[in-house]
Image (cartoon, rainbow, N blue to C red):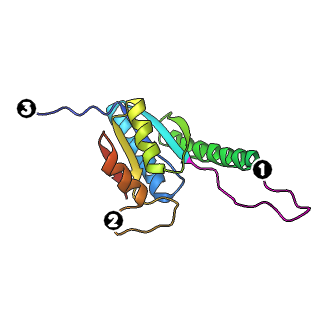
Amino acid sequence: METQWEFRRILVAFDGSEDSKRAVKAACALAKRLESSVILLHVFSVPVYAYGGPAGVPAISVESLEGTAKRQATTMVESGLELARSEGIEAKGELVESGAIAEAIVSFATKQGIQLIVLGTRGMSGLKKVLMGSVSSGVVNHSLCPVLVVR
């Protein structure tokens, strides 16, 4: 008996890297063929600084760091959504704050009933692995749904 795969809800992880841009294009191509919805997810974290500031110089506020990180993440999602629109797809954008990117992607996909995750082989981290980056490898190993890794 042949199983019919239905990828009605496609999640594409986007970090602005060239591989993630290719992932957006692949997800959009699939969405057109399968008449699926696309959710573009960007996972971001607030940088941590252990800095009290020298005497007379104010310390950086956590609120300032959080606000900056959120604005940058919003800009990132908008650039991914613009890329999806250029491919003919009106995707929905989502932001998740987490230091554990792969876990955040898998958790989001599970909670949202995602049927396919699409992501690039390597992101913006600059870490190089032989076959895949640490995030894509983590998602492949822990996802409950199929994962398409785009090179």
Is disc 1 placed on a helix, strand or loop?
A: loop
- Mark closest to the chain's N terminus, 3 or 1: 3
Foreground mark, 2 or 3, reads: 2
* Residue 32, above or below 63: above
Residue 110, can we see it?
A: yes
Q: Nearer the viewer, residue 122 or 86?
A: 122
Predominant SS along the magenta part: loop
Residue 6 location, x and y as percent? 27, 31
Question: Which residue is the extreme one toward the right?
Answer: 56
State the mark number for residue 144. none
Residue type of the residue flagged with mark 2: Leu
Q: CA distance from mark 2 to mark 1?
A: 39 Å
Give the x, y percent position of residue 41: 50, 41
Q: Locate residue 95, reporting x and y percent.
A: 56, 40
SS of the residue at dot 3?
A: loop
Which marked residue is nearer to the observer: mark 3 or mark 1?
Answer: 1
What residue sits right under mark 3 in the picture? 1
Q: Which residues are magenta?
A: 44-60
Q: Is residue 45 magenta?
A: yes
Q: Earlier in the sequence, mark 2 or mark 1?
A: 1
Asked which quadrant contains residue 59, the reply is bottom right
- As drawn, the label of residue 131 is 2
CB under 8 Å between discs 2 and 3: no
In-front residue for pair 92/115: 115
For the point 23% across and 34% down, the residue is: 5
